[in-house]
Amino acid sequence: MARKILLLAGSAGGFSVILNILKSLERPILIPVIVIVHRNPKYASSIEDTLSKALVQKIKTADDKEAIEDGTIYFAPAGYHLLVEPDYSFSLDISEPVQYSRPSIDVTFESVAEIYKENCTAILFSGANQDGAQGLLMIKRYGGKTFVQDPATAEVPIMPEAAIQLDAQERILNIQEIKDYIKQLT
Amino acid sequence: MAELTDKIVAMISFEELEEIIDVVKNLHGYDVSGYTRASLKRRVTRIMELNKLNLQELKSNLINQPGFSTYFLQEITVNVTEMFRDPEFYKAVKTDVFPYLATYPHIKLWSAGCSTGEEVYSLAILLEEANLYQRAFIYGTDINGKVLEKAKRGIYSLAKVKEYSENFIKTEPKNSLSEYYTAMYNAATINNSLKKNVLFSMHSLVSDGVFNEFQLITCRNVLIYFDTELQNKVLDLFYHSLCHLGFLCLGAKESLINYKDAAKFKIVNKKQNIYQKIG
Ligand SMILES: C[S@@+](CC[C@H](N)C(=O)[O-])C[C@H]1O[C@@H](n2cnc3c(N)ncnc32)[C@H](O)[C@@H]1O
């Protein structure tokens, strides 16, 4: 059976929406999930630890060379780009920020696009820069499913708007629709 | 997807990347077959974009132009670095490791994959502040000759060094970082006294062996670019290069978790990935 993956990404205003959606789930998402959010490495947060108590499934920071497993939510570590290898494991990269960001959503999206192709679903949420738009387009070109949060519902619409400008999305969804979509993956 | 399949999505495929790895190995004796593919691919793609080359042109340049090969080999490594990157790490070295180092009459340190030297000078400053520098000698090695030239000069952008001051302050130092460099125009030059007990030279973790015995080895943000097999080989090299009870310092996201002989090390600081050779 083909390996599938779900990507959730955002920055300003996006993180809390993603967290709320994850917390609202009553059953675990069956496929692997990668969450990429911009956060300051200087305040290396332990959000994963706090969250693991609130969630019905395993959640952790992605480790270098770790095999990607179903049913686990992985966070991109602060200060590193998160890449996916052809053998479905993670690798980390400390090269220059992309779109002023490290982790960069574009970098992870582009990496995942090529490995998972049509078996990848990516959702881009609220955010204050254009990171992610290019990567989302790449996922679409490889046949993956691409959604963006409706900019009208986003705290900071720059990120979803950038993606829409590139026509990178298959559909624009409001938060309830995103919730419903993710629910059927549980 | 149908109307888009004719569009070029990635500049090279993973299969084509393997061809390039083979060319570089067979023609130049430079073996990157143990490097992680996703990062390697990004680097090769970047070189192709910067030089406006397609795969055929890239291969032909690699085969026919010696100058290009040198450039290519320099550009496929990721050399991003900082002074006092991860201040908490340096603080831990100071509190958890220096008391042991202080018991040796001569302290030899090795920064493997030192890039442009910021890590080496950070260690030099840390040692200086602990009054250990006069008995210490730091070897900084890298596979990339170009970054080593910069390391030897020890001249960095003043704006960057001002950012590093913030890192430095978090290590709870005695002095301000500005004590350790001279500012002129937009450049900060590391004090000569800090270069006295430092030597930079080429060394490949893939193909070169043990060259000395050390009390401390740092290899930070290098292993993430290697697959687990190459990581094991390099960790063996470190094991054999450390004295009994010598220290091994890895990067913030690197550990001995995939190392077959991890039992030969004891964890000194789990969060900062500092280990001590015991076996
Ligand atoms: C990201 S930099 C890390 C710099 C510094 N240690 C730090 O953490 O800030 C990685 C360095 O490893 C070097 N490197 C890569 N492959 C190597 C090899 N086979 N042998 C020695 N150095 C290597 C690269 O040239 C690069 O300068």
Image (tube, coloured by chain):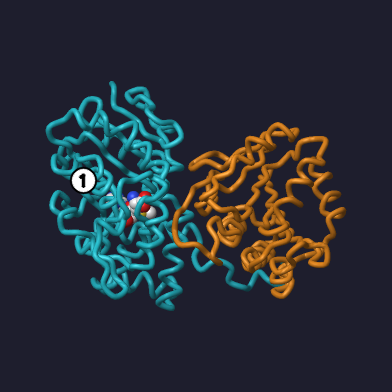
Residue B229: give x, y in percent of width and height.
38, 39
Badge count: 1
Of the 4 image quadrants, the one containing the N terminus of chain B is bottom right
Identify the image quadrant of residue A104: bottom right
> Compared to B244, does B52 lie above or below?
below
Colour cyan maps to chain: B
Residue at (71% x, 59% y) in the render: A124
Q: Nearer the viewer, residue B143 or B79?
A: B79
Residue at (30% x, 59% y) in the render: B178
Residue type (three-letter) at the residue carrying disc 1 = Asp
Report the chain holding disc 1: B
Question: In the image, B18: left or right of A155?
Answer: left
Question: In the image, B225: left or right of B184?
Answer: right
Residue B55: give x, y in percent of width and height.
43, 71
Of the 4 image quadrants, the one containing the C terminus of chain B is top left
> Compared to B114, does A24 lie above or below?
above
Residue behind mark 1: B208
Colour orange maps to chain: A
Residue B35 in sight:
yes
Residue ranking furthest to the bottom: B52
Residue B145 in sight:
no
Mark 1: is the Cβ under 8 angstroms from ligand 1?
yes
Residue at (38% x, 45% y) in the render: B171
Residue B15: give x, y in percent of width and height.
47, 58
Helix, strand or loop for disc 1: loop
Question: In the image, B6: left or right of B45?
Answer: right
Identify the image quadrant of residue B232: top left
